[in-house]
Structure formats: C-alpha cells, structure tokens
Image (cartoon, rainbow, N blue to C red):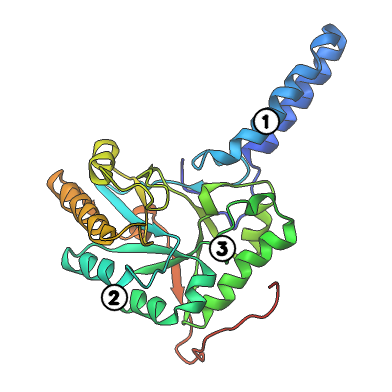
C-alpha cells in the first residue's frame, strides 16, 4: 500500500469502515429490521481476520513495499541475531554487496551484543522486532505490547542507534498497536514477499519459490536463524546465495530498505552518548 507514517494521527480504514457499518445498520433498522445486525457481524468478522493480512493496514498505516524506480527490492531478516549463522550470513552479503535490514529480537540482541555491533559495522540497518518475539503478542494487554516494543528500543539505544521501523511478530497487527508505535515514533514495516520458510524450518526450494514470485518494489522477508538438522546451515546459506544471484540475473537491484520505501529505518544517536549493554530487569 502507499507509504504513510505510523507516527501521524491517522484516520484508519477501520474507523471509516466501522462508521459506514453503523450508519448502514442504523438505516436498516427503519427498512429491514431483521437485516440490521448483518453489517455489524460482517464488520466484526473482518476485524478478526484483518490483523493476519500483513499488507492490509486496516488498523494503522503499514509499509509493506516500496516505490523505487526500476527493478529494485530490499532484503530483510527477522528473528535474530543468531550466533550460529550471523557471521556466515554477513560474509555472504558482503561478498555480493547486498545491503539488508535486520529486524532483531531484543532478548537475543541483549544476549549477543557483539552480533548487533557486527551487523552495524558491516553497514546494515536494524529494526525493532519486539523483545521476546511472542507470536501471541497482539493478544496481550496494551501495557505488555508497549513494553515489548519500548524495551527493545531502550536496549538498542545502547548501541548508538534508534530504530524507526517496527515489524510485528508474524506480521500480525491489532487496534492497540498504532498507539504504541506513535508514542515511540515508529513506522510499522511488514513485507510483500515472504519465503514461507516457517522460520527456516523449511528451506528446501527456498530460492526457487522466492524468485518465482518476486516483483519490483518488494520487501523480501527471510530469517537469520539456524535451521534444524546437521549441515543445514550450509544448505540455507546456499539458498540465500541463490536468491541473491537469481535476483541479479533477473535484473533486480538489491537496495537498502530505506531507499526502497523513501524514508529512514534507523538513525544514529549522538556519538557522545555512552554505549553499554542495557540489562533491563523489569517486566521479566
């Protein structure tokens, strides 16, 4: 969908559809009383299903693809950093001069600070992917949701950066997410092309599947976590390399996410700010 900032006060599609639904139901009360509840029921069902469509943007503005001219796309990696794969992946990206954005899990970043530093040292950008990567985060309380995001922001500030992009776990949103993101000045950035790798639990034919459905402007979702099974890390790396080489053979340019969507996804904090590992003891 078109790029809009999640930091702005926005009249979301949910507001508009909800208002139209209530007006329609009110009108039916005068003409077809037995039908008055139907629009409300449809609206409730739609509200229940909409969060699972990562590009829908029903409850808040969502950036799911870019508008860069030509055949450009962006690489993004979720759920890391994983010490078993990150250095190998960074070497691969450097070898092919492929920039990427890593949406990191705060808990993993806190336990592996050297990996966060290495990602930044190699010139890549980092986004917020919540603290624990709870797949049911959008069903938790507003306080829990806000703390999961804010805690990761505080942690990453100790590396001299402030992410400007948040990717919800599993790409699921909810009506409370806009408030949490607005307070932290974060955009909700999802994806338009996913590998369907189930968090690297299924990597057979990964490259073939991605190259078959990639389109200009796509934000590609991959995962930088170790696949299960002996020797599978090398198999996964081969698939990632095939994706990169395949994209280039198809005439695609792999560009930074910020360039693709036309807005920054991370900013550097003052160089004078102290950099130390933030060990948060709250919300354990």
Nearer to us of marks 3 and 2 is: 3
280 sits left or right of 196 in the view = right
x and y percent of residue 258 in the render? 38, 60
Q: Position of residue 27 (x, y in %)?
A: 81, 16
Name the residue carrying label 1.
Answer: 17
Mark 1 or mark 2: whose residue is earlier in sequence:
1
* x and y, in percent, of residue 242 in the image: 18, 51
User: Is disc 3 surrounded by few (<14), some (14 to 19) or many (20+) residues within 10 Å?
Assistant: many
Q: Which of 74 and 210 is in front in this view?
A: 210
Residue position for label 3 = 130
In this view, 117 is above or below 5? below
Q: Looking at the image, is mark 3 or mark 1 nearer the viewer?
A: 3
Looking at the image, which is closer to me, 60 or 5? 60
Within 10 Å of disc 1 (Cα), the crowding (few <14, some 14-19, many 20+) is: some
The outermost residue toward the left is 249
Classify mark 1: helix, strand or loop: helix
- Taking the image as shown, residue 175 lies to the left or right of residue 86, namely right
Which residue is located at x 31 percent, y 60 percent?
256
Q: Is mark 2 on a helix, strand or loop?
A: loop
């Amino acid at each position: 969908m078109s790029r809009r900032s999640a930091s702005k006060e926005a009249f979301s599609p949910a507001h508009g559809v909800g208002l139209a639904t209530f007006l329609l139901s009110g009108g039916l009360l005068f003409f077809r009383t037995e039908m008055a509840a139907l629009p409300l029921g449809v609206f409730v069902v739609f509200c229940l299903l909409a969060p699972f469509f990562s590009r829908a943007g029903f409850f808040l503005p969502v950036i799911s693809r870019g508008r860069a001219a030509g055949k450009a796309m962006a690489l993004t990696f979720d759920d890391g950093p994983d010490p078993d794969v990150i250095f190998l992946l960074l070497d691969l990206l450097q070898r092919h001069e492929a920039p990427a954005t890593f949406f990191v899990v705060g808990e993993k970043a806190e336990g592996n600070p050297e990996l966060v530093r290495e990602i930044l040292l190699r010139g890549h950008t980092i986004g917020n992917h919540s603290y624990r990567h709870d797949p049911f985060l959008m069903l938790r309380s507003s306080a829990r949701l806000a703390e999961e995001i804010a805690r990761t922001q505080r942690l990453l500030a100790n590396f001299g950066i402030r992410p400007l992009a948040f990717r919800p776990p599993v790409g699921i949103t909810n009506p409370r997410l806009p408030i949490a993101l607005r307070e932290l000045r974060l955009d909700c950035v999802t994806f338009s092309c996913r590998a369907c790798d189930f968090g690297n639990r299924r990597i057979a034919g990964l490259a073939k599947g991605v190259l078959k459905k990639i389109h200009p402007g796509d934000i590609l979702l991959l995962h930088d976590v170790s696949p299960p099974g002996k020797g599978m890390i090398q198999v996964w790396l081969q698939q990632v390399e095939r994706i990169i080489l395949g994209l280039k053979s198809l005439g695609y340019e792999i560009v930074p996410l910020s360039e693709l969507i036309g807005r920054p996804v991370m900013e550097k904090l003052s160089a004078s700010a102290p950099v130390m590992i933030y060990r948060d003891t709250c919300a354990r």
